[in-house]
Amino acid sequence: MSTDVLVVGAGPTGLATALTLARRGVDVTLLDKLAEPPTTSRAAVVHAYTLEVLDRIGAAAPLIAQAVRTPRFTVRDRDRVLLTVPFHELPSRYPYALLVSQAVTEAVLAEQLADLGVHVRRQCRLTGLTDTGDGVLAQVDGELLRARFVVGADGLHSTVRQLAGIGFTDPSDEESFVLADVRVRSVLPRDEAALFLARPGPLIWAPLPDGVVRLVAAVADAPPAPDRAYLQALLDERGPARRPDRVTEVLWGSRFRVHHRIADTFRAGSVLLAGDAGHVHSPAGGQGMNLGICDAVALGTALADVFDGGPDTLLDDYDTRQRPMAEDVMSFAAGLTRLATVSPARRPARDVLLRLIGAVPPVRRRIALRLSGLSHREADAELSR
């Protein structure tokens, strides 16, 4: 069996890579080890630049139809709003952040792919990769599959990255997070995502469709299945104080742990990496899935251009362009975490600084561009000149 491009991993990154290729007429095979797509997942925000990227492959409109639009993002210390980041002023057709479950994002991409006749081959495990000089021979559950290129979109523990011998930087200290979808009685606006800064760690409060709220919090030791009492204690510790939230129902909860790591390269011959296979970091700022989707469309476009007769160096350009974006996002996410966990003695100075920043429109605009990913669009335009 043969294919032009083998994509391993059917999360948002793998699906977006495959969709980009399929729309350009490239023969693509998409594998995933799971029997069914997850119905619960941690990523819940799609930023403006990512929507622009998704629009290139026809996936923005159907996603927007199923999501909550948020025209602003706030940074809070309990009841005090320290900084308001306005998305409605963004120089984009999508002047908002989109709040939607990752499961919905994946379903939209998979449906677009199916319309093009491409379906995910599930319960498939990649067990070997052999460089043939003009491509790769992949071993998938004992079957040999020949591909011109292989894309590893298979996450933090990427089998593709390991089989290709691509190094992964030594991990930073591990961070533990709890996440849950809940229903709450709350006075917080339902068209606004909020980052609560607290000494024990940040808490993200984000409204999803159907009255659901996504909570994500950095904690010392997250339980495998946080219950109502645990999540209520988190909100009591970090959320609004004068009129506190009340958790009425827990729809789903879990935990995850992350390190800050980046692959030594995003390309090794005919093997390429995208998304968490190439870089992982804190979820602060909601950048992870967004960067993975941007990787996917950039890589899919470069590969399609190669198949259309473009030079092989386009794939080196992919690494050159996406690596600085990954390093920038990693630095930004780490900075937000540090901002949240400053010592009590330094907290008043931090709060004053954030309020001063919020009072300066050009600075506020730069923060909005950074959060929305549109600063990457500007940087990419500079590289293209």
Image (cartoon, grey):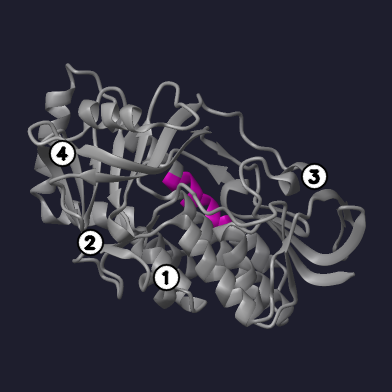
In which quadrant of the rendered view does residue 313 lie?
bottom right
Q: Sequence-wise, which precedes: disc 4 or disc 2?
A: 2
Say which mark, if any, is on residue 163: 3
Task: Point out residue 61 in the picture as x, y percentages from the top left corner.
Answer: 40, 77
Q: CA distance from mark 1 to mark 3?
A: 34 Å
Magenta stretch: dominant SS? helix
Say which mark, if any, is on residue 63: 1
Question: Which residue is at a point 57% across and 66% down the rendered structure image?
Answer: 16
Q: Amino acid at mark 3?
A: Leu
Range of residues picked out in magenta: 320-329
Residue 56 sits above or below residue 370 on the image: below
Looking at the rendered image, the disc whose residue lies closer to the viewer, 1 or 2, is 1
Q: Is residue 12 magenta?
A: no
Residue 51 or residue 168, whichever sits in front:
51
- Look at the image and tell me whether residue 294 can be seen: no
Q: CA distance from mark 1 to mark 2?
A: 18 Å
* Quadrant the N terminus occupies: bottom right
